[in-house]
Amino acid sequence: MSVMSPISPEASSTNVTDSVSLSGRLLDSLRSDVMTGRYPPGYRLVERDVADTYGVSRLPAREALQALRAEGFLEVRKTRGLVVRSWTERDVSELFDIRQALEAMACREAADNRTDDDVAALRAAVVAADDARDATAAHDANALFHQLLVTASHNRTLGEIMSPILFRVQWLVRQIPDPHTVSHDHHEIVEAIAAGDGELAESLAGEHAERNRRTTLEAMFGAG
Ligand SMILES: [Zn+2]
């Protein structure tokens, strides 16, 4: 499970900022615990249990569960209430279609709009994934790399639309047993962006997303 630092007395005050950051931190912890499989598909998440497990009151627990549902991680089942969602092959394909289109756009724009800091951060994420000692650390670095691609586009609307999509993609991509297989693609994409070659960055991103889709589907549903 992800570690959520104990809630300090200030956090339970009525201060709005504290309450928002508490819900946000709880959302991050819950999302991470779904992504890493602590709560598998079909697992029932009850407001009271969440409040007890993470040491928060019912209101932030309710808010975090609703936010996680809005991000597509949970679904309502008639007889069971709110559960971790299950994926069909078609669901996965639809998600990857959208990811492929938007990420190609992000990479094209990143090649035009990236700063030196963006390029440095992207390269650092690729190196961190290469140097990672276990699969979780490599997956984390890869997830960061994909977030940074959107950051480097400097397209705020794209960032808002892609945030929940990327979280869901990362959840699924974590089923891939060897996260290092994407290293070559990531190196190529970052260098195309650094060189300001939007066309190349866009086509590399599209190919990468396609390879990623096949590997993920294979990991989730077997070779087809
Ligand atoms: Zn990737």
Image: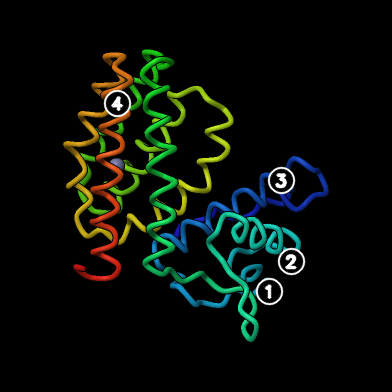
What scheme was used to colour the molecule? rainbow
Across and down, in percent, residue 217 comes to 29, 62
Q: Which residue lies under the disc numbered 1?
A: 48
* Element under disc 2: helix
- Count of numbered marks: 4
* Element under disc 3: helix
* Element under disc 1: helix
* Residue plotted at (52% across, 70% down): 84
Of residue 24 and residue 41, the one placed in the foreground of this image is 41
Amino acid type, label 4: Ala
Q: Which residue lies under the disc numbered 4?
A: 201
Q: Which residue lies under the disc numbered 2?
A: 58
Amino acid type, label 2: Arg
Q: Point out the tag, 4 or 1, that comes first from the N-terminus.
A: 1
Can you say whether 136 is above or below 65 in the image? above
Amino acid type, label 1: Arg
Disc 4 and disc 1 in contact, CB within 8 angstroms: no
The circle drawn on residue 111 is none
Packing grade of label 2 (10 A; few <14, some 14-19, many >=20) is some
Disc 2 and disc 1 in contact, CB within 8 angstroms: yes
Q: Distance between the residues labelled 3 and 2?
A: 14 Å
Q: Point out the tag, 4 or 3, that comes first from the N-terminus.
A: 3
What quarter of the picture does the N terminus occupy?
bottom left
Q: For this view, does 50 lie left or right of residue 126?
A: right
Amino acid type, label 3: Val
* Residue plotted at (39% across, 30% down): 149
Determine whether the beta carbon of the residue marked 4 sits less than 8 angstroms from the nearest atom of ligand 1: no
* Residue plotted at (31% across, 21% down): 193
Q: For this view, does 204 lie left or right of residue 107?
A: left
Q: Distance between the residues labelled 4 and 3?
A: 37 Å
Across and down, in percent, residue 59 comes to 76, 61
